[in-house]
Image (tube, rainbow, N blue to C red):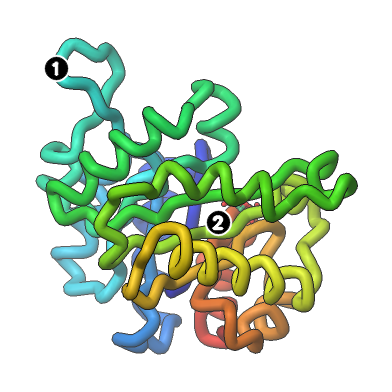
Amino acid sequence: MIIANWKMNGSKEEVSSWIKSVTEEVDFDNEKPCVFCPPSCYLDYSCSLIKETSSPIFLGSQNINYKKSSALTGGIDSKMLKEFLTKYVLIGHSEQRETFKETNEILHSKLLAAINEDILPIFCIGEPSEVKQKDNTEYFLGSQLEALYDVDLNGVIIAYEPIWAIGSGLNATKDYIEKIHSFVKEYCRSNLNSDVKISVVYGGSVNLSNCEEIMSSFEVDGLLVGGASLDPDIFSKIYNLS
Ligand code: PGA
């Protein structure tokens, strides 16, 4: 799967031209979902455009909230996302973890909220550079993966995004990505007792020149593309090459 994460970028006009161009330029493959995650305020509009043009693009939300009552100013719940045919949701992105101090307990509730509404979570994990330098990456990622305890992993996607690679132009090497993805898959098999074949996608400075090499690894099941996804021509090329 190839995912476009627009973060806090774009306008209505850009959403419209992006969906139009990507729908025309991408050679859609059913085995490789093409997922668009615009800012939440554009989900409704994106949903209408996708329906109007019968585009094979799937919608993903950049966020989901969880609270037992509806008293959460600014909150978006899973039922609302479902109204806009949202099929995927990013959970635990490092920017959200840092800004909103998301704990494993909060992330666990968000995972369950999505799954209960049949929205597939794209659960993001990744280490900061200090952790990598101390060679503590696996321990660090293991503690992030604990949020998945007792979660039905059917359909859950894990996105490995080293924090030092996000938006920095410093993508991880293919060998490093392969080692970490294999660790994540093994962790899910052994520690989460999962028989489910879990998909692990890579994100962090993916662009036109590195996408083919990263995707050539048998451990990489897709890409989560931030900055390079904003331009529809570049994103379409990344999809077609991957
Ligand atoms: P980037 O962002 O491709 O701009 O590094 C990826 C992400 O944060 O999902």
* Visible residue check, residue 186: yes
Residue under pointer 2: 230
Mark nearer the N terminus (1 vs 2): 1
Q: Which residue reaches farthest right?
A: 133
Horizontal side, residue 5 vs residue 33: left or right:
right
Q: Is residue 20 above or below residue 227?
A: below
| Quadrant, the C terminus | bottom right
Whole-angstrom CA distance, mark 1 to mark 2, is 33 Å
Instruction: Name the amino acid, label 2.
Output: Leu
Residue 42, x across and y down, in percent = 31, 42
Residue 194, x across and y down, in percent = 35, 67
Neighbour tally class for label 1: few under 14, some 14-19, many 20 plus, Cα within 10 Å: few
Horizontal side, residue 26 vs residue 174: left or right:
left
Q: Is residue 104 above or below residue 195?
A: above
Q: Secondary structure beneath disc 2?
A: loop
**Residue that appears at 66% across and 45% down:** 140
Res 70 label: 1
**Residue that appears at 30% across and 44% down:** 111
Instruction: Name the amino acid, label 1.
Output: Ser
Q: Is residue 81 above or below residue 152?
A: above
**Residue that appears at 80% across and 56% down:** 169
Residue 54, x across and y down, in percent = 17, 73
